Every structure is written in C-alpha cells, then in structure tokens.
Image (tube, helix red, strand yellow):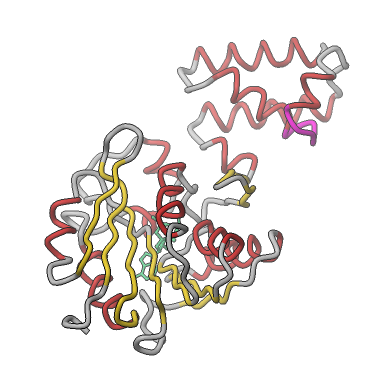
Amino acid sequence: MDLRTALLQGQKLLEDAKIDAPRLTAEVLLAHAVGRDRAWLFAHCDEELRELWWIHYGRYLHQRIEGTPTQYIVNRQEFFGRDFRVTPDVLIPRPETEHVIEIALRRPAQSILDIGTGSGAIAVTLALEMKARVRATDISIKALRIAAENARRLCAQVEFIACDLASPLDDAIFDLVVSNPPYVPETDSLPREVREHEPAVALYGGADGLDVYRRLIPEARRLLQPGGRLIMELGYRSAEAVQTLLSGWAEVEIETDLAGIPRVISAVLTRSLY
Ligand SMILES: C[S@@+](CC[C@H](N)C(=O)[O-])C[C@H]1O[C@@H](n2cnc3c(N)ncnc32)[C@H](O)[C@@H]1O
C-alpha cells in the first residue's frame, strides 16, 4: 500500500468514527508515524508504507478513535508560531490563549509572572517575545517538568516555581502578571475528549468556575508594583463576575475573540489599591 492509500483509509476510519477534521487528522497521524512532517508526506505519497509505519499509524488511529486528542498522540501543539511539547500532564494550549500574548505585547514589561503555566506556553512565548525577566508557577510538578523542557528546547529563560498560585514570591516585584486559570464550573459538561484526557486541575474552577479568580486577583494585587498590569483569560460567561472582582482596579478592559466572545480581561493596579 502507498502513503496516499493509507491516508484515504485513515480518513475513512476517522470519518466513520465522527472525528473532527478527518483528513487533517489522518495526515498528522501518518506524518507522525513516518517521523516526517506533512509537507514530506505530500511530496512522497507514492512511496510504499513500511510495515513499522503501518503498525504505528494503526495504533495512532485507534487512540484517536478511542478519544485521545491528536495533540497527546503526537505530543505537540503549536502556540504563537512555536511548537510546544504536550502530554496528558498539561492542558493543550488553545489558540484563544494567544489573545493573552497579543494583549501583553502591547506594552513593554520588565518583570513578568505567569500563574498556572501548564506547558509553559504563555511564559515561554513572553520570554522570547519581550526582553523581560519571566517567572512562572504551577501547582503541578508534572506540568512544570514539561514547561521546563519547553523552555529549554525553545531557548527561553524562564524561572519555574512549584507552588499554590504565587505563595513564596515577594510583594510588589512584577509589572505584569498573566494567567489562564482553571475556570470551568464543576457542573459544566465538557466534551468527553477534554473531560477524560486533560488534567482536571487545569480545567475546573470550583462550583461557579470563579474559585481561582477569587484568590488570584488579591494575589496579583500583592505581587504587582503600582501601575502594574494583570491580564487573565476569561472562562465562558465569566466576564461580568470577574469584572466585579476587579473593582477598584483601573483601566479594566475586556477583549473579545474573533467569534465575539469575551476572552481576556486586563486591569491596572492603581496607587489607591496598593
Ligand atoms: C487552564 S491551565 C493553563 C495552562 C497554560 N497557562 C495555558 O494557557 O495553556 C491552568 C493551569 O493552572 C494550574 N493550577 C491550577 N491550580 C493552581 C494553583 N492553585 N496554583 C498554581 N497553579 C495552578 C494547573 O495545573 C494548570 O497547569
């Protein structure tokens, strides 16, 4: 069998199993099985499928049909134009989170903290895009191992700290605090693929999804210098409640994504709050 036929067969299996983007998924999984990228695959679609490739490809298709996200099969996800390693120990970075980066890049910062770094997507990206000292925390040691590996691979200088929010860090040492906290209300029903494969600690934010925001906002107030900024990703339908939690902060702004959904909130720590 040649690679073209293998692709068509994989696509058909994925289609029958009602997997999203079956053609693209088949390409990504076959490229991974062959150990090349998709561009190579297109240039070599007449090549014979070797037995070992077939074994790997079959296993990946099976995993995907059973519900494992493609990113956990190939152990990678692109974020802001760079490849991040991901495993089931970390949340798969989402394209929506790139808005946090875009907003952070609008104003220079010298000392940045990313709370709940996961794969390190935000911290590593900001370290590479800005000339700043970047620190990042997570409560999950396993996540921090992946984040540190990503920083090393991408040559980013980030200091990683295992802790609850930012508990060991001194007061007033940052001019930017960023976070994409766990914000899914515990009663929400997530797609099976997310619920069964992504780490619960990265997803759920208590009964109403706001538990981490309630603790994170006072913590950011402690960590920021006056005039410093807090930028957070927003959970679905959480914008109003999070805005209320930011009462007393200045320049509170909500940014919507391309679909018009409120995605990111930013605020500046005023001297009066300090
Ligand atoms: C929604 S994920 C975000 C991961 C990554 N920043 C991203 O945007 O892809 C939330 C992260 O916060 C971490 N986390 C949850 N509770 C925490 C806490 N109390 N202190 C520090 N990190 C926490 C989780 O382990 C997870 O990595």
Indicate the quadrant where residue 192 lies.
top left
Residue located 50% across and 12% down the image = 16
**Above/below status of 175 relative to 77:** below
Question: What quarter of the picture does the N terminus occupy?
Answer: top right
Residue located 59% across and 67% down the image = 145
Viewer-nearest residue: 273 or 213? 273
Viewer-nearest residue: 186 or 39? 39
Report x, y in % for residue 124. 57, 62
**Above/below status of 151 relative to 195:** below
Report x, y in % for residue 120. 53, 61
Viewer-nearest residue: 154 or 56? 154
Question: What quarter of the picture does the C terminus occupy?
Answer: bottom left
Residue located 74% across and 10% down the image = 5
What range is drawn magenta here? 32-38
Horizontal side, residue 266 vs residue 118: left or right: left
- Farthest bottom residue in view: 170
Indicate the quadrant where residue 70 lies.
top right
For residue 19: magenta?
no
Report x, y in % for residue 17. 49, 18
**Above/below status of 7 relative to 257:** above
Residue located 55% across and 19% down the image = 22
